Amino acid sequence: MPKERMRWAELLDVLTDSDRRREVVVERATETERMALFLLRRAGWSAQISPKDTKEYDIEIVKPGVRSAVQIRNQRAKVHLGQIEKYLDFLNQPNGKNFTEGLFISTSGFTKSVYAYLREEKIKNLQLAIMRDHNLIFDCEKADAADEREKTTYIGVFTCKGGVGKTTISAHLAGAFALNGYDVALVDLDHQQNLRKLLGEGVYLPATKGSLGSVISVLSGDEWDEGDYKDTKIVVCDCNPEFEANPKEYIQKFDYCIIPTTLNPLGINKNADVIKRTFSAIRRENADAHLHVLINNLQPDEENRNTLLNQVLKTQFKQISERDGRVHYIDPAECAIRFSKQLMYWGFHLFDGTKPQLAFRTVGRYSYPRMDFLKLVDYLELQAGFQKLKAKSFGA
Ligand SMILES: Nc1ncnc2c1ncn2[C@@H]1O[C@H](COP(=O)(O)OP(=O)(O)O)[C@@H](O)[C@H]1O
Ligand SMILES: [Mg+2]
């Protein structure tokens, strides 16, 4: 056996008799799990593969006073916030309560939204680690330095209909990018100039734990200039619902369009028509942009109705997306903006005289808007990464 292969085999032969007994009943531990088991034991933990039929976690580790459930992910893309949300849900459920904390190990790292979320919600019962080159790295945000953005990304929030959340979504999507450490230009293309009214010249999200902090600059269509804002690589445009009123040079630059809509029974057909009109309007000027239908105002406690209404609405775009590979319907299970009082009353600061801010305050346990918009950033980033991979593998 070649030397390297032999070393690996030795390294991975870490199962104790009790692991083996469990393994006979369970499916075989994967190589990634065995590697993690080895590294955790080397780090002084008493570690065991999870019992039969346990899907929520892969390994249990124990030290005096600490009992931790370990989840391991070996996937090509970085672990994103939706996956972390699911694991946090498990840790907070009764059977998760047997553990004092959780550990999530990824071989590919984590998205920026994951770090931003854990930091902003001050979540203490979940640790992250990256498994790389036969090591567990716990200081992973540093190790996970994301690819630098060379090109400026333009995102248009647009639909030919008023009052469905364009301004709300533009502002908070910009906010989520800012939480991820990016400076953002928030360009107001709507005559109503609501963003100026709501946010003034902009907002600054202060630095936390060694990061630099980031700025959202609110600008009119004339004020934005790539040369003047060299560090700003994300541009989010709040569009005018009247297509012709939007400067063509912006529409042509869009890499992504977010098209907000709602799951309202009486409105479903009408909304679908509006969205189809929106698609064809954008396509007149821009053949390349990815167009994403996003559900806004989702009622989180109406799962059955949402599933059914979602099916009905989704079907309306099936043919279009078969013809145009860049038309996407974002499944609300993956990402949607939930109805929240925070978003409903966002803008109240205009009346009580407090300073401009985004609806990202933690209320009760979590902040819905913050979670939802960070997931939207993940969705767009992973989609972009996927496109890059695809382009590479086709040699384009
Ligand atoms: N997810 C949401 N939950 C609760 N209220 C929302 C949500 N999204 C938008 N709203 C509210 O709906 C109204 C219209 O939103 P707005 O962003 O101004 O729409 P548009 O820019 O498309 O006209 C606002 O009062 C806003 O607070
Ligand atoms: Mg608006």
Image (cartoon, rainbow, N blue to C red):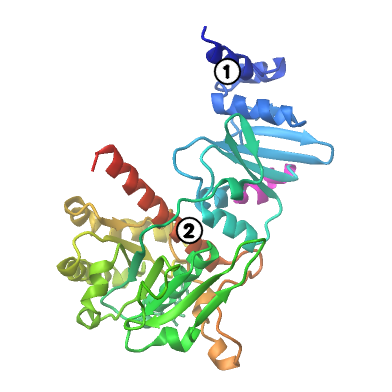
Beta carbon of the mark 1 residue lies under 8 A of ligand 1 = no
Q: Whole-Å distance between the Cαs marked 2 and 1?
A: 37 Å
Marks 2,1: beta carbons within 8 A? no
Along the viewing direction, whichever of 147 and 354 lies nearer the viewer = 147
Along the viewing direction, whichever of 136 and 275 lies nearer the viewer = 136
Residue type, mark 1 in image: Trp
Q: Is residue 370 above or below residue 2?
A: below
Q: Which residues are magenta?
A: 88-98
Considering only order in the chain, which callout, 1 or 2, is on the residue closer to the N terminus? Answer: 1
Q: Which residue is mark 2?
A: 375
Q: Which residue is mark 1?
A: 8
Observer able to see residue 93 = no
User: Dot 1, crowdedness within 10 Å: few (<14), some or many (≥20)?
Assistant: few
Give ligand 2's quarter of the image: bottom left
Residue 103 placed where, x, y %? 66, 42
Which quarter of the image is occupied by the C terminus?
A: top left
Observer able to see residue 352 = yes
Query: Would you identify the image quadrant in which residue 205 lies?
Result: bottom right
Q: Farthest residue toward the right?
A: 64
Query: Would you identify the image quadrant in which residue 259 lies?
Result: bottom left
Q: Could you say whether the residue bearing mark 2 is in a helix, strand or loop?
A: helix
Residue 347 placed where, x, y %? 51, 85
Residue 263 placed where, x, y %? 36, 67
Does 94 lie within the magenta span? yes
Q: Could you say whether the residue bearing mark 1 is in a helix, strand or loop?
A: helix
User: Dot 2, crowdedness within 10 Å: few (<14), some or many (≥20)?
Assistant: many
Query: Would you identify the image quadrant in which residue 367 lies?
Result: bottom right
Residue 24 placed where, x, y %? 60, 16
Query: Which residue is found at the position 41% from the left and 61% from the top?
Result: 305
Query: Which residue is found at the position 52% from the left and 73% from the top?
Result: 215
Q: Is residue 297 above or below residue 143?
A: below
